Image (spheres, rainbow, N blue to C red):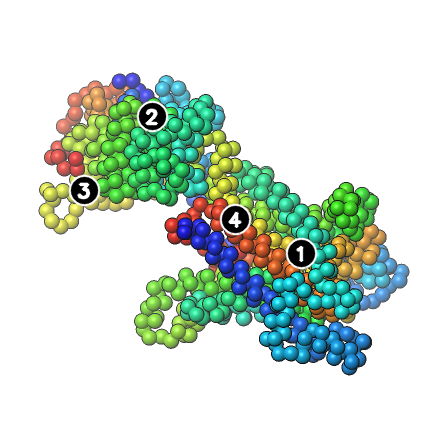
Amino acid sequence: MRALLELEGVSVNFTTPEGIVSAVSEVSLQVGEGEVFGLVGETGCGKSTLATAIMGLLPNTASLSGSIRFQQQELVGIGADEYRMLRGDRISMVFQDPMTSLDPAFSIGNQVAETIRAHRPLDKKAARVRALALLRDVGIPDPERRYGDPPHRLSGGMRQRVVIATALANEPALLLADEPTTALDVTIQAQVLDLLRDLRRRHRTTIMLITHDLGVIAQMCDRVGVMYAGQLIEVAPVEEIFLAPRHPYTQALLRALPSAKHAPGELPVISGRVPDLSDPPPGCRFGPRCPHRRDECELVPPLARETPDHSVACWLSEATRRAAGGGARPSGAGDGLPSGDLDPRPLKAEANR
Amino acid sequence: MLGSRSARIGAIVLLGLVSVAVLAPVIAPHNPDSIDPSRILGAPNLAHPFGSDALGRDVLSRVMFAYRVSLSVAIGSVALAFLVGVPLGLLAGYYGGWVDTLIMRPVDMLLALPALLLAVALIAILGPGTLIALLAIAVIYIPILARVVRASTLVVAAQTYVEGARARGASSLWIIARHVMPNAIGPAIVQATVLMGFAMQIEAALSFLGLGAQPPTPSLGVMLADGRDVLTQAPWAEVFPGVAIAITVLAFNLVGDGLRRRLDPRGVAR
Amino acid sequence: MSPRARLIVRRLLLAIPVSVLMSVFVFLMIRLVPGDPVRTMLGFRATPQNVRVVRKALGLDRSLLAQYLSWAGGLLHGNLGEDFISHTPVSTLLSTRLPVTLELTSLSMTLAVLIGVPLGVLAAARPGPVRTATEGFVVAGIAIPDFWLGIMLVLVFAGLNQILPPSGYVPLLQDPVQNLRYMILPVLTLATGEAAYIVRTTRGAMEETLGTPYVQFLRAKGLSERRIVFVHALRNAAPPILTVVGIQFGVLLGGAIVIESLFALPGVGRLIVTAIQQRNYVVVQGGVLLIAILFILVNLVTDLLVGVVDPRIEEGQPS
C-alpha cells in the first residue's frame, strides 16, 4: 500500500497573549492509499489542529514545522495559491458542525456547484448537472426541488450530507473528516457513517477520520492513531487498538469505557488532568498521570514499531528503547518482539461494534 | 481601572479638559471680552497662543470660556437624559407587557425623528437659548438611554437571583433598585459617556445656527459662526474651537470604550 | 404567508401609525408655544384685528380635535397652510426646496457608501497599515464636527485657493456642471462624516463574518480569498451595513440642516432655520413634517431591504 500522506516531525505552535502553546508536537505518521485512518484523542489533544495544518488553513498566529508530504509532494512551504488549488480538489475537509458549515445566504445546490467550478472548467449548467448528481449520491431526496433551498431548510443530517457532497465533488484523493457525526443524533450518525463508507468504497477515497468517539473508530477505521496533549503516542490496526493496546494511556482510555463487565458503581477514571499546553511537561506528556512512570519519561519517547503495523511511543516498549538507543528516529526501525515489561492487557470485545 | 492604554489617555485628556473648563476664570491668560485694536486678527504668538480675533480678543481665553458653557451643556444634557431615561428603561424592561408598550411607544416615536431635527423643532417651540438647547439634547438622548437600559434589564431580570428575590417575597421596586439596577446600569453608563461627546457636537451645531447659546453667552458654536467672517484672514479663530470639540468627542469615546470592557462586555451600548 | 412576507407587511403597516403620531406631534408644535403663538408670529404687526384674523385663519379658535382633523384633512390634500409673511402656500415653498435637500442627501449618502464600504472591507480583510489608517479615519470622521470640516474645506478650496465657490447654488436642471461645482464641498463634508460610521460598521460586520465556521469551510473548498470576501462575506455582512445606512440617513438629514445653512443652499433645512428665526411657525411645521416623513420612508425602505437580504429571517428564527 502506497503512502498517500506522510507526516514527519510535524509540530504546530500558537503564539497567544499567554505565551506559546504547543498544540502538536513532533507527530509522524503515514496514511496509505484507500484506507480509513482514525485519529482519536480527547478534546484539545491536537487532532483538529493537525488536520487544519494538513489543509494549510492554520491561522497567522500558528507556526508549523516538519514535513507534510501528500502524493509525494511536500506541502509545507508551498505558495498560498498552490495550496488553494489542492483544497477542495485533491484534499477535502468536512467540519464538525453541519449547522454552521454552510453559508446561510446561498442555496445548497449553489454551494456544491461552486466547489466544482472552482476547480473544473465547467459552465454553470454543467456544474449544476453534476451537483444534482452529487446531491442524489449522498441521499438528498428530490434533489431538483431542493437544489435551490437555503441551508436552514434542511435538518442537521441533511446538511452534513450536503457538506459531504461538497467535499467529494471533485473526487479528492484524501478526505479529512473532523468529528463528522459528533453534532448529530445517534440514528443520523449511523446514516452519515454508512454514507461515508459507501462513498469511500465507490470513489476509493482515503479518509482520515478525526474523532473522540471510540465507537465511531470501531465502526469505520482500518488503522488508528492515538493522540494525547499534542503527541502521537500509538498507531495500530483497529482491532489491536481495542484488543491489545500497548500504551498506558490507550489502555486507560479503553478501561474507562462503560461496559457490562464493570460492576455497578464508579467507572475507572484516569487520575490527574490534561496538561496546560502553554507549559507542557517535558518528555512524554502523559507521564505525570501514568501509573508506570519512570525517570526516563522526562525524555520524549520516539514512536517505534513493536510489530510491523503496531507502533508505540513509550519507554516501556522494547522497540522504543531500541529506537532511541540507535539515535532519535521518529518511526524507528525496531523489529523486536514485544517485551515482557509491557502488559498489553487484552480486553474482550468491549468496543461498541 | 480602565485597562487599555488608549482609555487611560482618554481619561487624562478628559480630566485636563474638565479642569480647563472649571478653572477657566482662573487660568485664562486674558479677559475673553477685552478688545485690543492693536491685535486685530493677530496671528498666534507667545502671548496669544491661539491668536486674536476680529476685535483683537484673545482666542485662547475665549475658547476656554466658551468651552465651559459647551461642556456644561454636554454633560448636563446627558445627565438629565440619564436621570429620566434609566428609570423608564428599567420599568419597561422589568414589567414588560402594557407598561413596556406604554413607555416604549412614545420613546420609539422620538427615535423616529432625526436627532438634530427634533432638537431644532423643540427650539422652534420653546425659543432659542442655552438652557433650552440643554433640554432639547436631553430629550433626544432619553430614548437612546432608555432603550439601552431596557435591553440590559431584560437580560438581568431573567437571571435566577432575581427569581430568587421574587420568591422571597421582595417587592418589585425593591428588586429593581437593589438587584436589577446595579447590574443593568453598566451599558447605560458606557452609552452616556459616549453621548456626552456627541452632545457637545449638537450644542455647537445649534449655537452655530443661532438656536443655542445667545449673546452674550459664549459657546464654541457661536465662535465657529463668528470665525467664518474672517476665515481667510484669521483661520485660527475657526480652527481652534473646532479642534477643541473634536478632542472632546475623542476623549469621551476613548473613555467610553475603556469602560465598555468592564461595564458592558456584551456590547449592549453602541 | 412566508415569514418574510409577513415581516414586510408588518413593517409597512407600522409605518402608518408612526406617521400619524408624527403628524400629531408636529401639529401640537404650534399649540405648545408658550404664550400666544399668533402674537409672537405677528410680532410688531400684532394689532388686535390682525391677531383675530390670523387666529381664525389658523383655526386656533376651534377645539383641539377639530383643529387637528381639519389640519390633517388639509394635509392629505397637500395643503400645509400658508406662509403668513409672503402669503405663499407652504407646499409651494417646500416643493421648490425639496429637490435641493434630496440632491444633497442622496449624493452624500451615495459617496459615503462608495467610500465607506470598500474601505471597511479592506480594513477587515487586510490587517496591518491599511487597518490602522482606516481606524484613524474612522476616529477622526466621528469626532470632527461636520460643519467645522465644511468650513475648513471652504478655507482650503474657496478661501486660500479659489477653486470652488464657498456658497450658493445653481439648480441641477439649469446647469449640471455649475450645480456640481456648488455641491462638491457640501457633499464632501457630509459624506466624510457618514463614511466614518459606515466604515466602522462594515469592518465589524466583515470581521465577524470572516471568522465564522462556514467561511472556514469555504476556504477548505479551495475558493479564492477574493470570492470569499466579496461574494460570501459581503453578502452576509450586508444586513447590518444596510441598517446603519438607514440610521445614518437620519443623522444625514439632521446634518443637512446645518450644512445647508453653512453653504447657503436653498433646501428644506435652511428654510426651517430661517423660519424659526422669523417665528414663522406654519412654515416650521411644514418643513419638520416633510423631513420627518422623508426619514420614515427611508427607514421603511431600508428595513424592507434588510428583510429581503437577511438570510436569517425565516421560519421564526430571530435575526
Kindly check if marks 2 and 1 are in contact, taking CB atoms under 8 A apart as contact.
Answer: no
Mark closest to the chain's N terminus, 4 or 1 = 1
Label 4 Cα neighbours within 10 Å, binned few <14 / some 14-19 / many ≥20 = some
Q: Residue type at mark 3?
A: Ala
Residue at image position (48%, 26%) is: A81
Q: Identify the element where label 1 is drawn.
A: helix
> Can you tell which of label 1 and label 3 is closer to the viewer?
1
Q: Residue type at mark 4?
A: Leu
Relative side of A66 to C233, left or right: left
Q: Which residue is mark 4?
A: C305
Q: Which residue is mark 3?
A: A256
Q: Residue type at mark 1?
A: Gly
Q: Identify the element where label 2 is drawn.
A: strand
> Can you tell which of label 3 and label 2 is closer to the viewer?
2
Is residue C158 something that shows in the picture? yes
Q: Identify the element where label 3 is drawn.
A: loop
Label 2 Cα neighbours within 10 Å, binned few <14 / some 14-19 / many ≥20 = many
Picture disc at residue A53: none
Kindly check if marks 2 and 4 are in contact, taking CB atoms under 8 A apart as contact.
Answer: no
Marks 1, 3 in one chain: no
Mark closest to the chain's N terminus, 3 or 2 = 2
Q: Which residue is mark 2?
A: A174
> Can you tell which of label 4 and label 3 is closer to the viewer?
4
Residue at image position (51%, 45%) is: C238
Q: Which residue is the extreme one toward the front? A: C77
Residue at image position (83%, 56%) is: B230
> Can you tell which of label 4 and label 1 is closer to the viewer?
4
Picture disc at residue C255: 1
Instruction: Determine the CA span between mark 2 and mark 4.
Output: 43 Å
Relative side of C276 to C7, left or right: right
Kindly check if marks 4 and 3 are in contact, taking CB atoms under 8 A apart as contact.
Answer: no
